Amino acid sequence: MARAVTPRRKIITTAVAWAIGLLIFFPIYWTILTSFKTEAQAINDPPLFFSFDWTLENYAVVQERSDYMRFLWNSVILAGGSTLIGILVAIPAAWSMAFVPSRRTKDILLWMLSTKMLPAVGVLYPISLIFVQFNLLDTRGGLIAVLMLINLPIIVWMLYTYFKEIPIDILEAARMDGANLREEILYILTPMAIPGIASTILLNFILAWNEAFWTLNLTAANSAPLTAFIASYSSPEGLFFAKLSAASTMAIAPILILGWFSQKQLVRGLTFGAVK
Amino acid sequence: MSMRTALRATSALALCALATAATAQDTTITIATVNNGDMIRMQGYTNLFTEQTGIAVEWVTLEENVLRQRVTTDITTNGGQFDIMTIGMYETPIWGANGWLLPLDDLSEDYDVADILPAMRDGLSHDGTLYAAPFYGESSMVMYRTDLMEKAGLEMPKAPTWQFIREAAAAMDDPENDINGICLRGKAGWGEGGAFITVTANSFGARWFDEDWNAQFDQPEWKEALTFFVNLMNDYGPEGYATNGFNENLSLFQQGKCGIWIDATVAASFVTNPNDSTVADSVGFALAPNAEGVDKRSNWLWAWALAIPAGTQKEEAAKAFIEWATSKEYIELVAANEGWANVPPGARTSLYETPEYQEVPFAAMTLESINAADPTNPTVDPVPYVGIQFVAIPEFAGIATEVSQEFSAVYAGQQSIDEALEKAQALTNDAMEAAGYR
Amino acid sequence: MATQHSRSAARLMLAPAVVLLLGWMLVPLTLTLYLSFKKYLPLRGDSLQNGLEWVGFENYARFISSSAFWPSVQATLIIVGGVLLITVVLGVLLAILLDQPIWGQGIVRLFVIAPFFVMPTVSALVWKNMLMDPINGIFAHLWRFFGATPVSWLSDASVQSIILIVSWQWLPFATLILLTAIQSLDSEQLEAAEMDGASPLARFFYIVLPHLSRAITIVILIQTIFLLSIFAEIFVTTGGSFGTRTLTYLIFQRVVDSQNIGLGSAGGVYAIILANIVAIFLMRIVGKNLDR
């Protein structure tokens, strides 16, 4: 931004922004902090911010009770697999809608979004019965398919809006030079679309990672991801704040770190066509 | 007869052979279970079972509500994801009647089925056949702070009335020092506050249904019970008791913030455990109260039990596990490692005959409470159902969850007692009609 | 412009996505419709194999005549509307703030987007226990510190609490989209307005807000789709008590607690109808905005 800003104003806005940022982040900060306390210190009044004995005990207890790595690995596979397949299906669709639009393009797009409106609980039995029928319960493949289908409309929408911003003149120039459809997509569009694709992948990875209804109801021991892991810590007996915090931290840390590292990529494409 | 015996013998042999074969292949069984302390402790010992038998165990540990949702969907859609399910006294007879569970009528001699407490055995059977083996059983009882009672100059009788409980709660209530006279469940959910208000109502002479399955919330006994409960809790209960369930109250009591807590007998070992409880050495026990002049006490009966769904391919391995986990030997194993106070209680007669266990302060009162519970005869007036804090019909969980939500709204001060009872009456009758009872 | 060849190629490329989604929509929808006309009480031994009894519109009549139905529609609309209002208003303000030159902008942005990465179950658990617990929660400590009586958030201010929790999760999403939109605003236009003596408020209402209208519509559209089906936040915190039983949650109770699949399926059909009413309403606006 080119406007000149007085130092005083910058100080004030900085202070306000930091205060709000910390406020929003506080629940997560507090969870992480509590995970290093003992159970008694976790509920101490007044709350302890630094003056406590840092301990890794809660993490040890949680790990002993449930094999974290297995849940983590399932989360990675499910979120990664569903996003990857979703992208492969969505790129051609979004491409065709963005560059060869027809009168119905917008209707198709909105219809796709509307498939997300069927409440999951309403179809718990139908989907469960189908899964039983095809032996898909507790398989990664079945869950990947469900997660992919849930998020496909969002993927298509994001890619579509991103593709639309690519200037069409470039394509025409390429066509003049005799590029065919495949070359067009491979050498011209894809490089230009990579930021948008990256951000779509990230967003859908996050959405798939956090999906907690199907991943809980269609899994048992083999394919259960971190959402199932956390379901065994929601209300144990007695004092449990510290253990709950440790389990929560373990469940969100991977995606939080990934999100933070890639936030630039995520933000760049996260416009859904909002900017024009 | 000889023909049949011969057949049985051959099939038993074949099964044994199968079992050995299965064992040799290192079978893995999947068990869905609830995330409470005793179950988690058992998971820690599972490797001993695997060493003995070669059967590996996969655990799916879930919070109670998620577990119910998960296993019910699995059993009704024939999902077959689990070889053993942890279920309660409510589900077992219903599922057993539907043929969804394997009967546990051929457990080994050593296992000694006859040793299971009769109340538990009856509650986990359908038509006299056992369908689930109790891992632990519970009733409910009064737990109170002996030091505070002494300070208040009162003495808890062995079998108090609600009126005395109120008096004692009033005497111990001390907001200055952060002590609530009494802590009780108010949380919505049929197994939480719903269970508690139901047994309270029983002890005031109320019942869920008359003999023609008409809801009884329009009767004066329900109003009396609910009014008493609400007044008691508003006067001497903790802030926000409308969202307190077993866990919340346990943690309050352990922190010394309750004078009296009436809840599951299994809680006794947690509140007397000095590692977790700040009041471990000053807890007394008494039978769950009744209203003056009413011949039913407010104690319930429950068991977390292990059952085998009918679709499993690993019947023998699953049975082997159940025999191990609910055996006398398992109890001894826990006793040897963690002390007698921490063994899973309420399942076996022999436990209460063990001299070491008789020394545990809450043992006698737990047994007495369990024996005082009579699921076939839970209320003053006759009822068409079995079950004390629940009604053993498939529709109950849904109905009671909604009813208890109406009651919790009363506890939170969001509607009046009359409004809640009226809604409860209407929605119960409506649901019963939908299910074809009326 | 596009040739016939590229048109048919385009159709071919669109086909997999459309076919998959059509299947994903039609199969469960058909099954749900089918079950909604049936008496299906699995705990009473009903099963697809044994054949289900046809009951006509009985499930539909029963679902809508239940005393819980209209309150649940109301709760759904209040929660969705409340979250939308909070996230859009705060999102705009926050986006403007983050657009200012500040020290440590990157770190502040990390803080602000963090809630978006937290899975709903975890965020509900954390808010319920660590923050809102009336005895040991941080809010209770804070209230006591100032001499006030701690609030029982999840019973006394249940709907507000749910709105707060869900807003916390979705504020980052709104903020990010709005921030990108603000950054695309032509700063010369703003400067010109400033020189002409337009007050900051006037600049906001006449330049910034119109520029953001498209982004706001998108935020509302996408969030509504997700918010209509929020479940974990309610399941973990209030279990549907204290006026927080949304339509989704009511269906859950009918299907899972009561094990009345027919009734729940009828509820599912109502939920689809409600979602479509909201959707048509939304798409009118979005459609208009997208054409601009």
Image: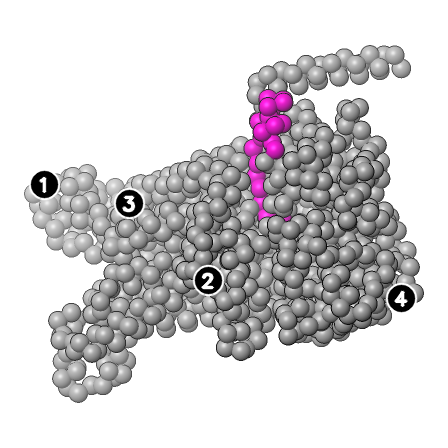
Dot 1 and dot 3 residues touching (CB under 8 Å):
no
A155 left or right, relative to B19? left
For label 4, the residue is B292
Same subunit under labels 1 and 2?
yes
Q: Secondary structure at mark 3?
A: helix
The residue depicted at 32 percent of the width and 44 percent of the height is: A87
When the figure is inspected, residue B170 is found, relative to residue C263, above or below; the finding is: below
Magenta residues span: B45-65
- Does residue B64 belong to the magenta stretch? yes
CA separation in Å, label 1 and label 4: 97 Å
SS of the residue under disc 4: loop
**Residue A205, percent from left and from top:** 36, 47
Closer to the chain start, of discs 2 and 3, is 2
Q: Amino acid at mark 2?
A: Leu
- What is the secondary structure assignment of the residue under circle 1? loop
Q: Label 3 amino acid? A: Ile
Q: Which mark is residue A178?
A: 1
Labels 2 and 4 positioned on one and the same chain: no
Looking at the image, residue B336 sits to the left or right of residue A200; the answer is right
Q: Position of residue B158 (x, y in %)?
A: 86, 57
Q: CA distance from mark 3 to mark 4?
A: 74 Å
Label 3: chain letter? A
Identify the secondary structure beneath mark 2.
loop
Which residue is pictured at 80% across the width and 16% down the height? B8
Tag shown at residue A48:
2
> Which residue has dot 3 on it?
A91
